[in-house]
Amino acid sequence: MAAGFLIMVLWLCVSYGVFTTRFLLALPFAFLFAFVCAGAGKATGVFLARRRLRLELDRFQPSSHPSLEGDSICRVFGHN
């Protein structure tokens, strides 16, 4: 969010000059751009976290655990 805001403010400074009327009128767009960047960052983070979770779940194989194999005896109940 902060990076998006700074990029937009710098772009406005280069385009319109520092603290000119046009700069001040366009400044609300910098705030909007900051929120767009925050949303994009959040969406990217959620996407990467879901992908990482999906990869970890794919690697997890419950059948490889000894207590879940068919020929093992349950320690609590004493049967399969």
Image (spheres, rainbow, N blue to C red):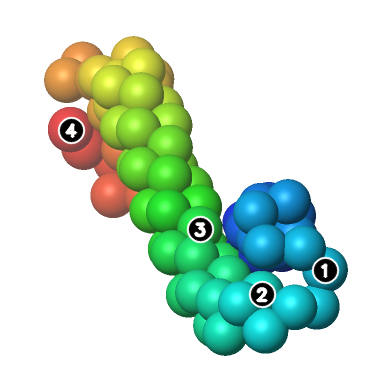
* Residue type, numbered disc 1: Val
Residue placed under numbered mark 2 in the picture? 23
Indicate which disc, 4 or 2, sits on the residue closer to the N terminus.
2
Placement of 75 over or under 61, stated as above or below: below
Asked whether the residues under the numbered discs 3 and 4 touch, taking CB atoms below 8 Å apart as contact, a structural biologist would say no
Secondary structure state at the residue bearing disc 4: loop
Asked whether the residues under the numbered discs 2 and 1 touch, taking CB atoms below 8 Å apart as contact, a structural biologist would say yes
Residue placed under numbered mark 3 in the picture? 37
Q: CA distance from mark 2 to mark 3?
A: 20 Å
- Residue 33, percent from left and from top: 50, 65
Q: CA distance from mark 2 to mark 1?
A: 7 Å
Secondary structure state at the residue bearing disc 1: loop
* Residue type, numbered disc 3: Cys
Residue placed under numbered mark 1 in the picture? 18
* Residue type, numbered disc 4: Asn
Q: CA distance from mark 3 to mark 4?
A: 55 Å
Indicate which disc, 2 or 1, sits on the residue closer to the N terminus.
1
**Which residue is nearer to you in this view: 57 or 12?**
12
